[in-house]
Image: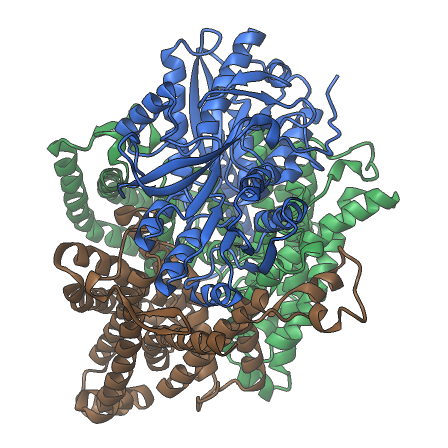
Chain colours: A green, B brown, C blue
Amino acid sequence: MSDTTKSMPAAAGASDMVARIKRYGVWIAAAAVLLVLPYIFPSGAAITTMCLMGIMIIFALSYNMLLGQSGMLSFGHAVYYGLAAFVTAHTINWAVKNGVPIPLPLIPVVGGLTGLFFGILFGSVSTRRGGTAFAMISLGLAELVYSSSLILRSFFGGEEGISADRTKLLRFFGYNFGPQIQVYYLIAAWCLLCVILMYAITRTPLGRMCNAVRENPERVEFVGYNPQFVRFIAFSLAGLFAGVAGSLAAINIELAQASFVGAAQSGAVLLAAYIGGVAFFVGPILGAVLVTLLSVKLSDFSEIWVFYFGVLFVTMILFAPYGLSGLLMMHAQFWSGPFGRRIARIGRLFGAYLIAAIPALIMLAGGILLIEMIHHVAQKGAEGANMHFLRRPYLTVNTYAALPWVGATIALIGGFFAFRFTWPTVAKAWNDALADTQRSQS
Amino acid sequence: MAELIIISTLNGVLYGLLLFLMASGLTLIFSMMGVLNFAHASFYMLGAFLGYQISQWAGFIPALILAPLLAGGIGALVERFGLRTVHKHGHVAELLFTFGLAFIIEEVIQIIWGKLSVDYRVPSWLDFPAFTIYATNYPAYKTFMLLFSIAIFIGLILLLTRTRAGLIIQASLTHPNMVGMLGHNVPRVFMMVFGLGTALAAIAGVIAGAAFVTQSNMAALLGPILFVVVVVGGLGSLWGAFVASLLIGLLQTFAIASDWSLYKFFGDYFTPTRGTILHDVWTVTIAQIGPILPYLLLVLVLILRPTGLFGTRET
Amino acid sequence: MKWQMPKKLLGLAAVGLVAGAGYLALPQKTEAQGATIKIAYVDPLSGPMAGIGDTGLKNFQFILEEINAKGGANGKKLEIVPFDNKLNAQETIVQVQKAIDQGIRIITQGNGTAFAIAISEFVTKYNERNPGKEVIYLNYAAVDPILTNEKCSYWHFRWDANTDIKMEAITNFMKGRTNVKKVYLINQDYAFGHGVRDAALKMLKAKRPDIEVVGNELHPIAKVTDFAPYIAKIKASGADSVITGNWGSDFALLVKAAADAGLQVDWYTFYAGGTGGPTAMKQANLPNRVFAIGEGFANLPHKEAQEFEKALRAKYGVSLFYPRGVNQMRMLAAAINQAKSDDPKKIAAALHGMKFEVFHGGEGYMRADDHQFFQPMYLASFGPIKADQPFDEEKTGWGWSIAGKIELKDTVTPTTCKMNKPS
């Protein structure tokens, strides 16, 4: 695994100013993108979804401080997220009740401190060991906290959770954060801040030691560091950022609920980080965006969306273990040499992809149609023969007729063989691009 | 009181033996490949549904034989074409692969059998009270489950210690390279063990599905408990898994049977005000916290004795 | 793999973010409320509770078909649009938001008080912050009294009788049964189960102080695979009756375990009729010993209702789980007709205090104080169907017969709601 933290090529010879613009340019660009996004996608659901994405980005990056950077596989990261959400809700209610003048934008600090506190508390117990033991302790702790949410009702609010009204706090420059768009900017600002901080951490000596602990704890010990302590620090910091994410989540829906500390939430962040790719800093960002989008959108198309989600996940593990960012990175190497040559090179490669994509899509469509038809016949018999494929009335399929079944099977099998047929073309295009890159560099 | 203790012991032992049927397969797989198979409980569920389907067509006995064979075959295929591929990416990838597989199996079961419970019943020739203790009936089917699980346990021990195949498996656990050099196909041994492990889980599914409810959430209910059993018992130790299964079975059953709470003992001296966390802690009964006791045990064991009760190596 | 410039990747990430979010913009064409009035059905359609959500959806589809066949409401047709809340509070809010974005301003939901409260609070805040775009929430099954008491809202309307009302009805029935002497309470360990327990304790004490409560059990919800240990406890306590609010597999498993152990008691339940319940009761062979409370049952001798039930079963293969759903949708149509508008604000004003002839006959009303619907209730027992009873459940050959009717006036419970009526 290579990682994000290799030092950037020193801007030798360039002036200070240029180096500075280069260094901060990407963050300024990110800030600009975050600023204009709501104007490009102004619908309420889009803004709600982007809020969830922002929260998930922080959460997934904090998770990757454990898995990607320090090699700790946790099944209970939602504990810090969820507990911070509850403390946030309680804090808002307390501040409103007692008239304490705290503006809403500062509330995530409380969440972060909560996450840090529990990170230190549970981290001191669980980070003494790495590997599977750590994974199992995290699982056990998560189950303990989740189960206690049903017992400690005064804190967790039982089934209905703790609700809070974010608008009743001290106004912040006249904003009361009632409209979702104001909350979006709040989340975006915190998201950017946390991303920058977490990126900075990867570049400190601590970040380096985390990588070393991941790769070989014994050798870390030989050079005089204590791997347990490094793990502990990384774990506490991950708790801090998970806390910020949880706090924002509580602000976003004005509610903290037991499911926030549950296994599903811990699983979701694991999926997001892994699908995005844990080997690169940006991986979890991509993963968070994709997973949020899929979980909001897929259910519009199919009732069995979890199945497709699971298949996607397993496919990624089997064929793209470095995730989306790994796939991107494989292509980043072609981005060198003269500009025209870069474009031509990548254009040719993507041309080959396009050729392969057509049969692949046919195969996929055939497979999905088959699965949907089986599901319809097995589970929706009462609704009759007709099925709305992908929940679209204009894609009505008669599941009693032979044609759709035969057609789908042919598409699946034929598509597969046609797809296989294109593999050599893709492989050749890849090798050509690689050779071309090397030529242009030499 | 004696009645409650006897019945609770019987129930606890039965639950423990069911846990053991699943945990034995899991611990074999774990110790051999170092993979915590997250999908193990899913094979238990698959066994229950296959058992239901086959018993609809051919009766209970064929189901008891065929369903585990089928599930074991599927397990072997998963090892051959899935796990072996991800093996090169390390343990985390393997673990996550089984994590994703659990999702898929659950969804496939929902696609085929639906989301509601299926009507999987105890066969009529076992549907009568076997004996009565203090006016409580103990059903014949549960007696059957009890004896059957014990028989499997003894069979497994004999297989591993008395047969050539068992000796090869044991050797592969500790010295895979040596076994490979002696001319045995170690990957195939792995595949067989994975198949055997999943088949054992499926057996548990076939017999438990009929007694309880066969529904697509049954894997999620039992999955985490299995890890507790395996880790508490000690990795790779069949005896450890056996003792831990019984321990957890009895622990949960007896916890349910008790109404103790701090309030009950100290309520006369001190009662916290309602609506505070202390009040919640004060009034909760052992029966209510029964389900979390195994996890408490897990965390404590991992911290205090990472080898587990009977294990010889750390997790 | 070669690693060159992290910044470039961040740029790529931004592109991915934009592309991803761009996809969001696509299917969100806001449809003006045209020829149909859409109602968002926000309930679990995937995951462990999907079966229940699915059955409810079928119920509502059929109910609306019937209303549309009679001309719809205010000349428009009604349509139910499913949204999957995945049994998650955050998702619930996202899906409601999605529905609102599509121009839907009537929400219905029923499974899970937690999600009901989340929707009720969201809708209330949304209406406060978006005057002129009000949304109403019609609750058909979330029964925590809190929704029409401490957390009541003008925009929330509930057609299901809440826990207190149902327990009031059950205990009024038990009051007359002299064979009840020792009662055991077993409930799921969450808000609803606690509500059942507390109401039972309070009302039994008031109505039949001679009854001894010999056990009071809370068990983890949807986590118990074998209820035998609990049954052993019930047996040891010498109870003759059990009151339980258990639903779903927690009920089915409980009854199965009771039958295995040969426990012979009367069962007073809230949701014995739920999916899987009838099959379990038949398997357990407990004829006429399980009672359930509800606003109506299939075998009630009411001609129109029976025809409706027959048509639903013929078309969708499910029983009418939600007679209250019929009341809800018919009242919605009536309110739209009365307001001559499908503006939710006007609908709410029409529903506020509305009187209505309920599905199984008799008058009911939507109490203006808290928006809780009151109607006559029935207690039914489950056993082999008799000659004059047309319907069995889950093909078991057993069905519900009415054991007692609780008149409207005996179901009314007080409320603490202080409703904020919008100006």
Residue A336 shows up from this direction: no
Q: Residue furthest front?
A: C178
Q: Residue at x 26, y 61 (%)?
A: B122
Number of numbered labels in the structure image:
0
Query: Is residue A280 placed above or below C363 in the rendered structure?
Result: below
Q: Position of residue A13 (x, y in %)?
A: 64, 58
Q: Against A220, is C292 above or below?
A: above
The residue at 19%/44% (across/down) is A412
Q: Is residue A427 left or right of residue C165?
A: left
Depicted C387 relative to depicted A379: above or below: above
Q: Where A83 falls versus C97 (above or below)?
A: below
Q: Position of residue B100 (x, y in %)?
A: 38, 58
Task: Compare residues B103 and B110 and report the one nearer the observer.
Answer: B110
Q: Is residue C252 visible?
A: yes
Q: Position of residue B288 (x, y in %)?
A: 58, 64
- In depth, the one of C35 and C350 nearer the eye is C350
Q: Nearer the viewer, residue B252 or B114?
A: B252
Q: From the viewer's perspective, is B274 left or right of C236?
A: right
Residue A131 horizontal side relative to residue A17, left or right: left
